Image (tube, grey):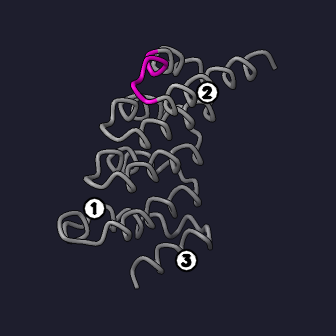
Amino acid sequence: MRREVAEALGEIGSKEAVPHLIEVLKDEHWLNHGDWRVREAAVKALGEIGSKEAIPYLAEALKDVDSDVREAAAYALGKIGSKEAIPHLAEALKDVNSDVRESAAEVLGKIGSKEAIPHLIKALKDEDSYVRKAAAVALRKIKQQSQN
């Protein structure tokens, strides 16, 4: 039920929902005993709404115990598209889960800031080929954006 509520709030897209979605991420029950799908839905909804107010909470979600939540947090930060997310996404490039690292690289390319370049260059040496490819594509996007 709570998952569906979080999804609906994201679909509606009202910034009024942001504090309620943040509460889901801060709630000890959902953090320690809760269904990871509720946290994932809240993170995705925050990304859909796109409020910069959510950045610190999405950055914290990049450290969630569940890799699906961490991956969703990376994409949500990408939807917001703020340079404030770069240091957090750079940290996510070191995640134990390759899907999270790949998502972080993709999102850094989407944000398109030159500040991400050193982090993406390091990701070109990642053990996972998908992460390396995502980093290369991201670097190309940043180059193209800087030429425009």
**Label 3 to label 2: alpha-carbon separation:** 31 Å
**In the depicted view, which residue is nearer to us: 113 or 63?**
63
Residue contact at pointers 2 and 1, CB within 8 angstroms: no
Q: Position of residue 22 (x, y in %)?
A: 38, 62
For label 3, the residue is 8
Q: Secondary structure at mark 3?
A: helix
Q: Residue at x 43, y 36 (%)?
A: 101
Q: Secondary structure at mark 2?
A: helix
For label 1, the residue is 26
Q: Earlier in the sequence, mark 2 or mark 1?
A: 1
95 with respect to 51 (left or right)? left
- Residue type, numbered disc 3: Ala
Q: Earlier in the sequence, mark 3 or mark 2?
A: 3
Instruction: Answer few, some or many: residues within 10 Å of disc 2's Cα (few below 14, many 20 plus, some between 14 and 19).
Output: many
Residue contact at pointers 3 and 2, CB within 8 angstroms: no
**Labelled disc at residue 138:** 2
Q: Secondary structure at mark 1?
A: helix
Q: Residue at x 42, y 67 (%)?
A: 21
Quarter of the picture containing the C terminus is top right
**Label 2 to label 1: alpha-carbon separation:** 31 Å
Q: Is residue 130 magenta?
A: no
Q: Which residues are magenta?
A: 122-128
